[in-house]
Image: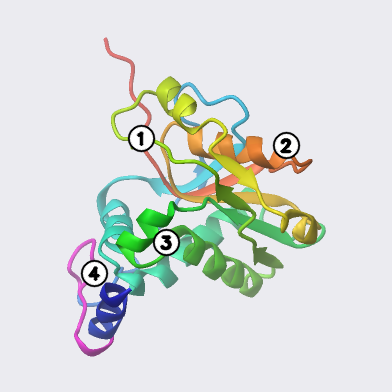
């Protein structure tokens, strides 16, 4: 938490260059924050994965911005990233307000990760994105309806099958679900790789009668090209 406060203070008192290109119009300039919302289904999509939309590929300036925000507590990036996420969500919804409020459901972070980082990056983005969607004419609210119920191994280096097995039954829906189930449910995460996390979140919500049909992320890892 001290690191988050210190970075926020430095962002206010010191000129911050863009994390993508060092342009003085930081912390993320309009050029580096350009988005191309599109369906980005992972290779060998996980069973139960909702229709998945992402703002852009996990590469270049966006990758650097996400890493700076998550791992180095550059929370000044949150507003710009949330704007990208909100625009992607509105695009995925067809660009028009659906019936009822859109309910953004952030993927929860492990407590140890929140302690290490000093903040919960996805929860913050979901809350800011919901507010931004309201300014775009789409009524939205962020609800932390999911909770981790067991520890999982580090996902780095795991195959799609191994990721699915690692995450299976790791999430549960909380009691807040019934209070907020008046509109479309949209899962929110920062990055989609194989889709295992989003598929597990969808399973947990389906177990209590909910039906998240969309997932929205800031970035998607690039699909592997078949070898010649």
Could you say where residue 185 lies in the image, as x and y percent from the top left?
Answer: 70, 50
Discs 1, 4 touching: Cβ within 8 Å:
no
Q: Is residue 15 left or right of residue 188?
A: left
Q: Nearer the viewer, mark 3 or mark 4?
A: 3
Lower position in the chain sequence, tag 1 or tag 4: 4
The residue wearing badge 3 is 121
| SS assignment at label 3 | helix
Residue 155 shows which numbered tag? 1
Q: Is residue 1 left or right of residue 108?
A: left
Could you say where residue 191 lies in the image, as x and y percent from the top left?
Answer: 42, 46
Q: CA distance from mark 2 to mark 4?
A: 43 Å
What type of secondary structure mainly makes up the magenta span? loop
Lower position in the chain sequence, tag 1 or tag 2: 1
The residue wearing badge 4 is 18
* Residue segment shown in magenta: 12-23
Q: Residue at x 19, y 86 (%)?
A: 14
Q: Residue at x 31, y 80 (%)?
A: 5
């Amino acid at each position: 938490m001290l690191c988050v406060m210190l970075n926020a203070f430095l962002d206010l008192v010191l000129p911050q260059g863009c994390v993508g290109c060092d342009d003085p119009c930081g912390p993320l300039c309009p050029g580096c924050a350009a988005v191309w919302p599109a369906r980005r289904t992972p290779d060998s999509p996980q069973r139960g994965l909702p229709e998945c939309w992402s703002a852009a590929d996990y590469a270049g300036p966006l990758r650097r911005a996400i890493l700076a925000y998550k791992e180095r507590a550059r929370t000044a990036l949150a507003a710009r990233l949330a704007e990208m996420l909100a625009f992607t969500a509105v695009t995925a919804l067809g660009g028009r307000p659906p019936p009822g409020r859109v309910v953004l459901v952030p993927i929860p972070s492990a407590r140890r990760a929140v302690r290490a980082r000093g903040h919960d990056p996805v929860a913050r983005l979901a809350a800011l994105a919901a507010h931004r969607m309201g300014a775009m004419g789409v009524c939205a609210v962020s609800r932390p309806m999911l909770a981790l119920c067991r520890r999982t191994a580090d996902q780095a280096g795991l195959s799609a099958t191994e990721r699915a097995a690692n995450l299976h039954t790791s999430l549960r829906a909380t009691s807040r679900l019934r209070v907020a189930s008046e509109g479309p449910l949209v899962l929110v995460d920062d990055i989609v790789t194989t889709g295992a996390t989003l598929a597990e979140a969808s399973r947990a919500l389906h177990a209590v009668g909910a039906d998240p049909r969309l997932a929205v992320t800031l970035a998607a890892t690039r699909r592997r090209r078949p070898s010649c």
